[in-house]
Image: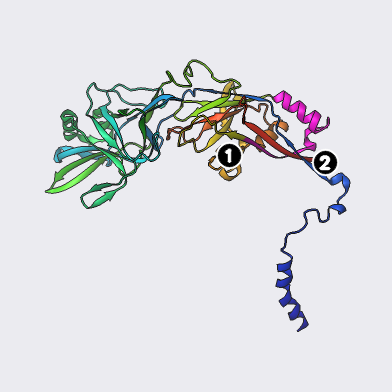
Amino acid sequence: MSRLKWLLLLPLFALFSCVDENETLGIDLIDENDKLSVGLFTDVKMSSCFFKEDSLLTANYRYNVFGEYKDDKFGSVSSEIFTQLCLSSTAEDFTTFAIDSIYLTLAYSGGYSSDTALLSTRMKVSVYELDEVLDSTKKYSFNDAAVKSLPIFSSEVDIDVNSDVVMGTDTLNPHLRLKITDNEFCQKIQSFKGDNDQFQELIKGIKIVAEKVTENGFMAYVDMTSSITGLVLYYEKDNKKQTYKLNFPERGNRFMRYEYDFTGSEINGLERDTLGVSSEYIYLGNMGISMAKLDIDEQAFKNYWKDSINQGAEHNNVAINRAVIEIPIAEIGQSTLPIQKILCYRKYVSNGDTIMVLIHDAQVSDTYYDGRYEHTTNSYRLNVTMHFENYLNGNIDDLDLYLVPDERRSTANRVVLNGTNNQTKPIKIRITYSKPK
């Protein structure tokens, strides 16, 4: 009975043992030689610049951008979609269809404008039939493809990425519906009989363009693999009204083409050379507009780390607890939709080729690395602890970092950041460390 009494009291002892303890409790029992001191180092010597991104791959991504947008800071950028069409069956005989109409349908996945409350924007949308076969070399944002001179559709339409589409008794997710008006194109499809390869010889694909008719314009995001997206044939067969869908290929040949005009903008001249070395501001834009570089003085960092922090000892006597890049957003008028996440890359040379790769920290997890826009502080925080540890341990020989917008192919967001030369609140790298006393 006595044993049972003590067992019943154990939960109470456990409860009282959960109170906060004095953090210094027992520190007098630790040998002086084993105690650590904690320090903070923020004087990392570096400069910053931003420059236009070259050779951006845009082939076969799920989310595509089309439209045109302009502002005073970043100038004008536009995106066009080039894509093949493919049968949704192994082969088909459209000569047996009594085709009534053909619609291009594009499922929205979002959009970008100067006003986040904007529900609908007027745009001039044109669709062209391709005049050349798309192959696997057409995969970069600077690529182009020949089209027939006259569009198969061209009209001003409302781009509304937020409102559902009601068709009869059905309510469908937001999407754009364009009725193809070119009779020659429709007749070409009506006369087809064969397999997918034969179809792509007949219809090489389409180009989708949207031009601004308002001051700023609009960028629409499309889910290219949605069940809604494609070319839909409405026809009658066996006295029944039916539909047949021509899909955009998931792994076929399709890409986006971007065009820029920085004339008169705050980044005028970006195409000619790197801008903003030791800059006050960094202009970071999606869709290949720009990326940034933090040029870190490795020798100055290594010397300070060894001489001042280690007092001449080897670096392995000091442990980096955390290294974080703090990037404030500039207070010079901002987009209402800044870039949601900034990725961190480094460069290295392999077999004579320069390769850009995510730093190890960014490969661990989103929670560990962070990099996301923080609304409350109006800034970004990038965990680069492993990157600095790898440098000090000799695993990498270059500390320089490249800041690249995430989702830069599928969104049009942009942001102006304070650079390393900003007099008010520059980019900082904060390194906390511990070492033996």
The C terminus lies in which quarter of the figure? top right
User: Does the magenta segment cover residue 261?
Assistant: no
Q: Earlier in the sequence, mark 1 or mark 2?
A: 1
- Quarter occupied by residue 374: top right
Residue 401 rendering spot, x and y as whole percentages: 61, 29
Dot 1: element: helix
Task: Give the camera-side residue of 11 and 71.
Answer: 71
Residue 369 rendering spot, x and y as whole percentages: 59, 41
* Residue visible at 27% across and 50% down in the picture: 171
Q: Which residues are magenta?
A: 298-325
* Residue visible at 19% across and 46% down in the picture: 242
Q: Total label count?
A: 2
- Quarter occupied by residue 130: top left
Amino acid, disc 1: Gln
User: Does the magenta segment cover residue 321?
Assistant: yes
Pick out the residue farthest to the bottom.
1
The N terminus lies in which quarter of the figure? bottom right
* Any part of residue 236 in sight: yes
Q: CA distance from mark 1 to mark 2?
A: 31 Å
Residue 133 rendering spot, x and y as whole percentages: 31, 25
Q: Is residue 340 left or right of residue 419?
A: left
Front of the two marks 1 and 2: 2
What residue is disc 2 on? 436
* Residue visible at 69% across and 26% down in the picture: 45
What residue is disc 1 on? 363
